[in-house]
Amino acid sequence: MARILAIDYGKKRTGLAVTDELQIIANGLTTVATAELVDFLLDYVAKEPVERIVVGMPKQMDNTPSENMGRIRPFVGRIRKLLPGIPVEYHDERFTSVLAHQAILASGIGKMARRNKELVDEVSATIILQSYMESRRMRKEQ
């Protein structure tokens, strides 16, 4: 099996998470400057087997797309052209930043580390990936 890679796409920074090769556990990978994201992804998939890419889809509470979708759609189109053998899916990312802040707070990390926005982005990507994996398991069980 190959890994699943999750992306929490941001205007300045993008959080990344990845599964193990058996797709059991979601782990934070890193946070990269969004301007360097495509190069990072091309390099990563050249080194690691990636089965699919999951991109967080930001939505408002009324289910309409958030402002960031205007940046995400062109990015996803570009990735689909550059990596045609790897499916790219969207997954709802509502509340992931709030959940990431709560997870970081609950972990006991110090106050200065909690202010690290890159950590929040990476944890958000991990939450997106974990949620995606759980929803996939639920569909298989039905």
Image (cartoon, rainbow, N blue to C red):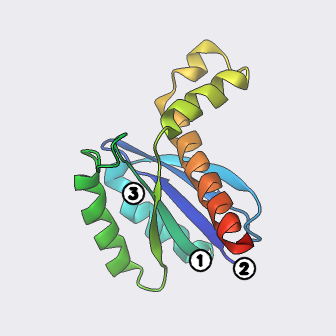
Q: Which residue is depicted at the point 25% across and 64% down? A: 74
Secondary element at tag 2: loop
State the residue position of label 3. Answer: 37
- Label 1, label 3: how far apart the Cα atoms are: 18 Å
Q: Which residue is depicted at the point 52% across and 30% down? A: 98
Amino acid type indicated by mark 3: Leu
Which corner quadrant of the image does residue 55 belong to? bottom left
* Quadrant assignment for the C terminus: bottom right
Secondary element at tag 1: strand
State the residue position of label 1. Answer: 51
Amino acid type indicated by mark 2: Met
Q: Which residue is depicted at the point 53% across and 52% down? A: 16
- Label 1, label 2: how far apart the Cα atoms are: 8 Å
Chain-order first, disc 1 or disc 3: 3
Q: Residue furthest top?
A: 111
Q: Residues within 10 Å of mark 1 (few under 14, many from 20)?
A: some
Q: Is residue 99 above or below residue 87?
A: above
State the residue position of label 2. Answer: 1
Chain-order first, disc 3 or disc 2: 2
Amino acid type indicated by mark 1: Glu
Q: Position of residue 139 (x, y in %)?
A: 65, 70
Q: Residue furthest front?
A: 142
Q: Are marks 1 and 2 in contact (CB under 8 Å)?
A: yes
Q: Residue furthest bottom?
A: 85
- Label 3, label 2: how far apart the Cα atoms are: 24 Å
